[in-house]
């Protein structure tokens, strides 16, 4: 018996309802699906919960999941997006273009026919209006090969629809911000393991963006590790030359150490091992006064080390009142 080879489609999936529903619609047209999830430092919880959900979903729905890490080029997008920011520091149009270029690379490598997303016309004011959708398609070099199954009937047919590769009659014409229809379709199709509609992008969170803006304002060179660290600990801007980060709990410590850069200093406490500090830049005495607000003992001995574990300095710190130093908290 000859085994039929299915045509491949590449789905850029966020783990949210819309992208999972789009995946289901394409799967129903008998395509082999490769789902691409792109991990950035700006996903709540580092995207770990979403990835676990997608791993479950890939087994249940029988599609291949590829998780990609962003590269340093993404930092340039955050610094100076060609198409500007949204309400906060969210460069949504530039971000979509970047991610779709990555999906296009997978499409070419895997001999896929097109890329699809869960975008819906009018759902997001800046990045999902008609003009933005056209810009994203053109700039990602996917003209004619970028399908938005949930809103396709509101858009001009793509190349894959015109050629009959995709049956346009089985696509949808959803538009606007309401997700009632998507939730109804998910229910009748038995879909689960999808995330909340907000998506968990921290670039839309004003409090997170304060820390990101501090990073952009004070450093010419920014690494991905710097960005990952923004989700961890309490951040204190002491001076243009010094930033202190203090762990909030013991579970953060390993990640904080992993995301240190070559020139960072680590602070370990003898009596309070559940706390560590990171100094980025110049070592200033006030950093230890701030750290003293978070110890449980009256005094402690600290060890300042570089990321290779070499001892730089030891000293005694005393318990202080953290309220006295809240002005430094970002």
Image (cartoon, rainbow, N blue to C red):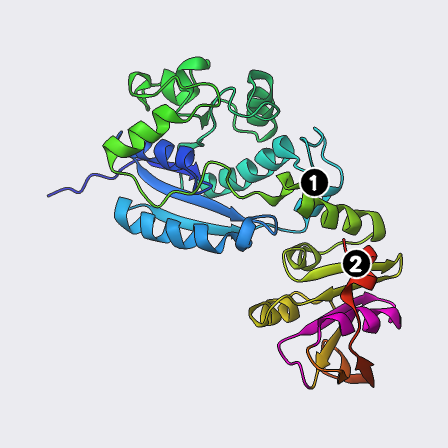
Secondary structure, mark 1, is: helix
Number of numbered discs present? 2
Q: Quadrant of residue 181?
A: top left
* Residue that appears at 56% across and 29% down: 141
Residue beneath label 2, please?
326
Question: Quick check: 243 left or right of 105?
Answer: right
Residue bounds of the magenta highlight: 271-295
Indicate the position of residue 22 as horizontal and vertical percent values. 37, 31
Identify the residue shown where x is 82% and y is 62%. Answer: 325
Q: Is residue 9 found left or right of 74 in the rendered image?
A: left
| Residue 263, percent from left and from top | 79, 69
In the figure, residue 293 lies in which quadrant?
bottom right
How many C-alpha atoms fall within 10 Å of the one at disc 1: few (<14), some, or many (≥20)? some
* Residue 250 in sight in this render: yes
Label placed on residue 77: 1
Quarter that holds the N terminus = top left
**Does 203 lie within the magenta span?**
no
Q: Would you say the residues marked 2 and 1 are in contact, meaning their CB atoms lie under 8 Å apart?
A: no
* Image position of 321 with respect to 98: above or below: below
In percent of width and height, residue 40 lies at 58, 49
Q: Which mark is residue 232?
A: none
Q: Position of residue 216 (x, y in %)?
A: 79, 47
Q: Label 2 to label 1, Cα distance in Å? A: 32 Å
188 versus 266 height, above or below: above
User: Does residue 263 show up?
Assistant: no
């Amino acid at each position: 018996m000859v085994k039929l080879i299915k045509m491949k489609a590449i789905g850029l999936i966020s783990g949210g309802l819309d992208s999972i529903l789009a995946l289901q619609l394409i799967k129903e047209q008998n395509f082999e699906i490769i789902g691409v999830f792109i991990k950035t430092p700006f996903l709540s919880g580092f995207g770990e919960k979403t990835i676990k959900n997608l791993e479950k979903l890939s087994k249940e729905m029988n599609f291949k999941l590829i998780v990609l890490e962003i590269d340093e080029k993404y930092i340039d997008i955050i610094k100076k997006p060609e198409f500007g920011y949204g309400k906060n520091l969210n460069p949504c149009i530039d971000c979509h273009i970047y991610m779709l270029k990555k999906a296009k690379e997978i499409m070419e490598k895997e001999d896929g026919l097109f890329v699809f997303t869960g975008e819906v016309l009018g759902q997001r004011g800046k990045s999902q209006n008609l003009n933005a959708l056209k810009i994203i398609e053109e700039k990602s070099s996917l003209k004619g090969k970028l399908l938005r199954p949930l809103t396709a009937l509101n858009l001009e047919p793509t190349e894959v629809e015109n050629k009959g590769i995709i049956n346009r009659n089985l696509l949808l014409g959803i538009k606007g911000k309401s997700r009632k229809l998507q939730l109804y379709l998910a229910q009748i199709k038995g879909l689960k393991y999808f995330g909340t509609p907000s998506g968990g992008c921290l670039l839309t969170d004003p409090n997170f963006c304060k820390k990101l803006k501090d990073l952009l304002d004070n450093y010419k060179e920014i690494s991905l590790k710097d960005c990952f660290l923004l989700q961890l600990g309490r951040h204190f801007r002491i001076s243009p030359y010094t930033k202190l980060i203090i762990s909030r709990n013991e579970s953060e410590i390993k990640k904080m150490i992993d995301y240190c850069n070559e020139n960072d200093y680590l602070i370990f406490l003898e009596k309070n091992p559940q706390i560590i500090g990171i100094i980025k830049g110049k070592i200033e005495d006030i950093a230890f006064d701030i750290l003293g607000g978070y110890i449980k003992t009256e005094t402690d001995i600290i060890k300042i080390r570089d990321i290779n574990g070499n001892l730089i300095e030891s000293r005694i710190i005393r318990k202080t009142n953290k309220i006295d130093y809240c002005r430094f908290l970002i």
